[in-house]
Image (cartoon, rainbow, N blue to C red):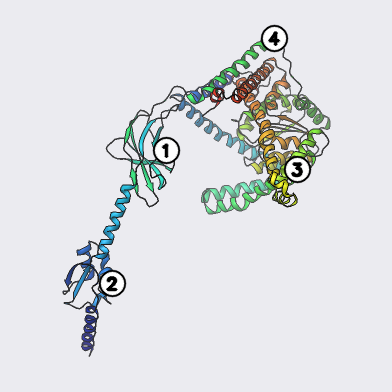
Amino acid sequence: MKLRVPLILCFLCGLLMIVQFFIPHPPFTNMYEKLLDWAIIISIFTIVIGLSSLIKLHYTRIARKTPERPYSVVVFVGMAVMATVGIINGVNGKEFEWLFKNVQVPMQATMFSLLAFFIASAAYRAFRARTLEATLMLVAAIVVMFARVPIGSFLWQHIMPDSVLQWRENLPEDVAGWIFNVPSMAARRAILLGVSLGAVATSLKIMLGIERSYTGSGE
Amino acid sequence: MILLMGLASAGSLRAQIEKRDVNFEILGTVTMKKGDILWNLARRYYGDPLKWTLIKEKNKIPDERTIPIGIVIYIPTVEAKKIEKKVEEIIAEKKAFAPVTSVTASDTPSDDGKSVTITWELSPDDDKVSQYEILRSSTASGGFEPVGQVPAKTNQYVDERDLIRGNEYYYKVRATDKRGISADSQVFGPVKPVAQWFNEKYKFIGIAAIVFCGIIIYCIYHARRGQEFFVRRIAGIEAVDEAIGRATEMGRSILFLTGLSGIGSISTLAGLNILSRVARRAAEYDTPVLIPACDPFVMVVEREIVKGAHIDAGKLDTYKEDNIYFVSDDQFAYVAAVDGLMLRERPAAIFYMGYFFAESLILAETGNSTGAIQIAGTDSDTQLPFFIAACDYTLIGEELYAASAYLSREPLLLGSLKGQDWSKLVLIAAIVVGVILESFGIHWVSHFFSVP
């Protein structure tokens, strides 16, 4: 019974969502809105659980004097400062905005900027021409890079003889565009079609109770 | 002495004014009496006291405060005519500015009865129009209020503003030019928004859903009756056991990430399905699974799943709730925390199963630098190349959804997998037929499949 009730609820809610998608008439539209409201209310409660989990984790680290405890102290200080400023001056207040713009945003930008270095290291590994596929990828990448960077167009215009330029003035851009719009797009659409069918099958499995690992009961 | 100076000054002022040239049309003359001021004259003759400067200028009066008594002031009419002419021009232009025609309003089809679609024929002076404003009223006689606006060259607007299902509404369209001159169309109405019982726009989706779900349910039905299905090998899924075994042998933990999407994302649910299989095997080998979550909702479900896996394995005593914790819902704060965790804990196996964004490569490259065996699975086509470059194995797109069935080998799940493959075959056949027919100029297939 403990397992059956969530499965029945899951099936009914899933069915309701499908029905309201095709029938825009009341009461289905109203029920859809109500279900969304419930989801928001439930998610608010889970924020409390998430926050308590975070506090418990870092408190335990400090209490046990683990080597990572300085980071946990930073978490508590940061949390206390932001909460205090937000409660006193409001989240639209100048102080809160200052902290957001001058502390949080630069830290986010720092993390994001790491991506540039990671792209370089990943590209180095991916483009080593060990196999036919890797070689094809390397050639495609070189062509696309050549077409996308300003110096590529500059070199093409200045190195190529006039006869070639008259034939194809923007050949690198055309080739890069073709790679994007034909083979790359075809592969992406194939993946998306598979993904869509996979999503339909997974939804159906969850609705029918065949896939019920989310209930925590395992097999 | 002062009196003499004053008289002399007044005399020179009178002489100066009387020397003026009356070379302008006049409306009349006024002999200034005691108490007369130009302000009152302007109000009397023009209806606008602010035009006193015009009288002053034409009569060449140096100081309006010391106009001598008895002097004749000419009231000019030239400017008045100019103003009148300008008004006439504006009225003429306004008359020339044609309003929109053929305004129609109808209930928007396939909706919940809370919108009306208004269409019209563009004004013949559309090139002068800056915007069309749509006005609505509940009566035809008046009380029209603006509900929206669209730029020139647009002849349709969908009104969704506070409409009540079943009420009657009247509409008109106002064309306005850059100077603010406007011309209203005729009133159209009444129109009554009503709700429909079927969304016509989604009829293809409905048919496709019935066909695909039918195929999948048919295959599940056959699987339930004991039919065995062949499933092809997927290297990434076969490596899951290898990764768990490696972590067990090395005495290190497994790191499992389900992406940044919430519980409403189907890829997160697919990731959670895989987590249940991984957690079950890890529980059997007493290998800890660390799960930093970016969504508290997902964290709660992950705790239930891992706890359930330990119960199924008969190892509830080894379940540690603190291994699954909330970090942050901020993308890069989450990345910083997980990167730190990777470098400190050095897990032997890392799983990325779900929907990822720009953080995918930062995470996967950091994991790669720790020497962990990495298995990724995502349906985010923009992040797939990063995972392929940085991870040992990658489940591409639909393989993420299939992984749970592969790992469990449950007949019903494998049946759904087979149904998925048959559905794909139907889709491929439809594409091939559509391409052939379209090549021969037969368009009904592509029209049928298009969703407005």
Q: Do the residues under discs 4 and 1 have CB atoms within 8 angstroms?
A: no
Q: Tell me, yes or no, whether dots 3 and 1 are on the same chain.
A: no
The crowd level at tag 2 (other Cα within 10 Å; few <14, some 14-19, many 20+) is: few
Residue B417, image quadrant? top right
Q: Which residue is mark 3?
A: A142
Closer mark to the observer between disc 4 and disc 1: 1
For badge 2, the amino acid type reads: Glu
Estimate the spatial distance between the alpha carbons at disc 3 and disc 1, rounded to whole Å.
47 Å
Identify which residue is drawn at 72% across, 47% down.
Answer: A163
Estimate the spatial distance between the alpha carbons at disc 2 and disc 3, rounded to whole Å.
78 Å
Residue A126, position as x, y percentages in the image: 78, 38
Estimate the spatial distance between the alpha carbons at disc 4 and disc 2, rounded to whole Å.
107 Å
Q: Tell me, yes or no, whether dots 4 and 1 are on the same chain.
A: yes
- Left or right of B134 in this view: A52: right
For badge 4, the amino acid type reads: Gly
The crowd level at tag 4 (other Cα within 10 Å; few <14, some 14-19, many 20+) is: few
Name of the residue lying farthest toward the top? B225
Q: Which residue is mark 4?
A: B226
Residue A15, position as x, y percentages in the image: 53, 21
Closer mark to the observer between disc 4 and disc 2: 2
Q: Do the residues under discs 3 and 4 have CB atoms within 8 angstroms?
A: no
For badge 3, the amino acid type reads: Ile
